[in-house]
Amino acid sequence: MTALLLRDLRLATRAGGGFGLGLAFFLLVAVLVPLGVGPEPALLARIAPGILWVGALLACLLSLDRIFALDFEDGSMDLLAIAPIPLEGVVAVKALAHWLVTGLPLTLLSPVLGVLLHLPGPGYVWLVLSLALGTPALSMIGAFGAALTVGLKRGGLLLSLLVLPLYVPTLIYGAEAVRRGVDGQGAPTALLLLAGLTAGAAALLPFAAAAAIRVNLR
């Protein structure tokens, strides 16, 4: 499984592998929002938690179709399906690789973009914590959606339509955690809910995604 993880990381960091695409999109969102809504610091500070979380969500969405598509096209998925590693483990490893090249860099970059959006000082810790707890759920849910659409040509639009409604709870709790942190109310409840979503997705969705892949391989 370690070899599979390293292989996916190498493919993602090569030219055309999608690494950096999510970061560039996240940066563009943070730059364009002040141009669209105006440079007023009070307004930007109020909408910053939601904008940063929406930007992270959409940035994760950009590279979801790459999770299984390349392996499906070149026949590697057939070999992985009959390998000694359970297919559920393959799904989990690929979701982890997606998070390492998208969710983790977005989490680390988020404080810099918070400065661009005038996020108040108390919100930075909660922003990083919420993204660290919530983005793994985005990758796992995205892996499930990618497994459902892996056998379809040009399934990117369908993948987005399937995954976006499932992202809504994570978006709500993540933005609420940052908002409560900014207001000084504390956000342990929202963070616990985010952690619960991530744990539930990691426990259940690899089995659902593996079943979908087996159906597409028939």
Image (cartoon, rainbow, N blue to C red):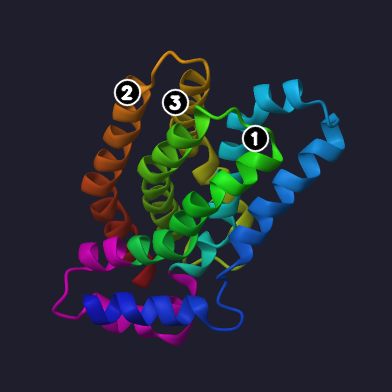
Q: Nearer the viewer, residue 82 or 174?
A: 174
Verify whether residue 73 appears in magenta.
Answer: yes
Pointer 2 or 3: first along the chain? 3
- Asked if disc 2 and disc 1 are in contact, CB closer than 8 Å, the reply is no
Which residue is under mark 2? 188
Instruction: Provide residue 101's location: percent of width, then percent of height.
Output: 46, 65
Relative side of 203 to 217, left or right:
left
Crowding at mark 3 (Cα within 10 Å: few <14, some 14-19, many 20+): many
Residue lying at the far left in this picture: please name it. Answer: 84
Which structural element holds mark 2?
helix
The residue sitting at 36% across, 52% down in the picture is: 140
Which residue is under mark 1? 51
Verify whether residue 129 appears in magenta.
Answer: no
Which structural element holds mark 1?
helix
Q: Which mark is nearer the camera, 2 or 1?
A: 2
Q: Is residue 138 above or below residue 72?
A: above
Which three-letter amino acid code belongs to the residue tagged 2?
Pro
Question: In terms of image quadrants, where is residue 16?
Answer: bottom right
- Asked if disc 2 and disc 3 are in contact, CB closer than 8 Å, the reply is no
Which residue is under mark 3? 177
Pointer 2 or 1: first along the chain? 1
The residue sitting at 50% across, 45% down in the picture is: 163
- Asked if disc 3 and disc 1 are in contact, CB closer than 8 Å, the reply is no
